[in-house]
């Protein structure tokens, strides 16, 4: 006796539901891929925007010699980047010890007063300054005159170059920030806070 083959009866509504689920899955996958591509494009665009306003602050000290007995020490910050640099509070240090910016000539007098005379020609705090691209800011100008010999003066000026340093954060207009320690250490820093009270 031969078994009768079972006939499969397809329920039309079930087939339509399965096709709809399949189409929905494909659509969801395509939407996910499109969203991922759009996010990557937005991140690339944001990176390009940040790069178009990237500030870079160069910290330099200069010694200007006026004969053998007078040297002018000058500390200058220059924005060599292509966007404005928004600077936060600055810590001024000499030989690792903090001091108030306006006290620097006194720090030098206390340390070297028996060897040189110190005159402060200019003092302009860097705290909360915004530097445009290409703009410079002279933080301090000190004039040192030797009481004895020029060799001693050279040694003192070299020591000042080495021991005077600033510590601060600066940010781009998009809030990407860097920290500065001394002349050479500039690095991206997420701990810096973006100043919103820009004038």
Image: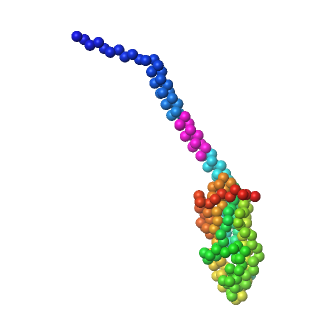
Please state if 41 lies on the left or on the right of 63 as rendered. left
* Residue 70 image point, x, y percent: 73, 81
Q: Residue at x 69, y 74 (%)?
A: 100
Question: Magenta span has 41?
Answer: yes
The residue segment tinted magenta is: 31-43
Judging depth in this view, the residue of 1 and 36 nearest the camera is 1
Is residue 159 shown above or below 24? below
Quadrant of residue 119 within the rendered picture: bottom right
Judging depth in this view, the residue of 123 and 83 nearest the camera is 123
The image quadrant where one finds the C terminus is: bottom right
The tally of labels here is 0
Is residue 25 shown above or below 129? above
| Main SS class of the magenta portion in the image | helix
Q: Residue at x 56, y 38 (%)?
A: 35
Question: Magenta span has 142?
Answer: no
Quadrant of residue 36 within the rendered picture: top right
* Residue 102 image point, x, y percent: 72, 74
Please state if 27 lies on the left or on the right of 170 as rendered. left
Is residue 37 shown above or below 80? above
* Residue 19 image point, x, y percent: 47, 24
Q: Residue at x 73, y 77 (%)?
A: 142
- Farthest residue to the left: give it: 1
Q: Residue at x 62, y 60 (%)?
A: 192
Report if residue 89 is visible in the image: yes
- Farthest residue to the top: give it: 1
Judging depth in this view, the residue of 93 and 72 nearest the camera is 93
């Amino acid at each position: 006796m031969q078994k009768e083959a079972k006939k499969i009866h397809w329920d039309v509504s079930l087939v339509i539901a399965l096709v709809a689920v399949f189409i929905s899955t494909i659509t969801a996958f395509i939407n996910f891929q499109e969203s991922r591509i759009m996010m990557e494009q937005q991140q690339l665009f944001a990176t390009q925007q940040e790069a178009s306003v990237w500030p870079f602050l160069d910290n330099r000290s200069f010694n200007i010699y006026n004969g053998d007995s007078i040297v002018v020490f000058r500390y200058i910050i220059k924005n060599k980047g292509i966007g404005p640099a928004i600077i936060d509070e600055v810590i001024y240090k000499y030989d690792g010890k903090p001091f108030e910016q306006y006290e620097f000539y006194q720090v030098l007098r206390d340390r070297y007063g028996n060897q040189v005379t110190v005159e402060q020609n200019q003092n302009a705090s860097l705290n909360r300054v915004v530097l445009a691209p290409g703009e410079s800011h002279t933080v301090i100008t000190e004039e040192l005159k030797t009481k004895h010999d020029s060799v001693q003066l050279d040694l003192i000026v070299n020591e000042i170059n080495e021991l005077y340093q600033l510590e601060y954060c600066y940010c781009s207009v998009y809030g990407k920030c860097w920290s500065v320690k001394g002349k050479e250490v500039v690095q991206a820093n997420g701990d810096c806070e973006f100043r919103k009270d820009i004038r």
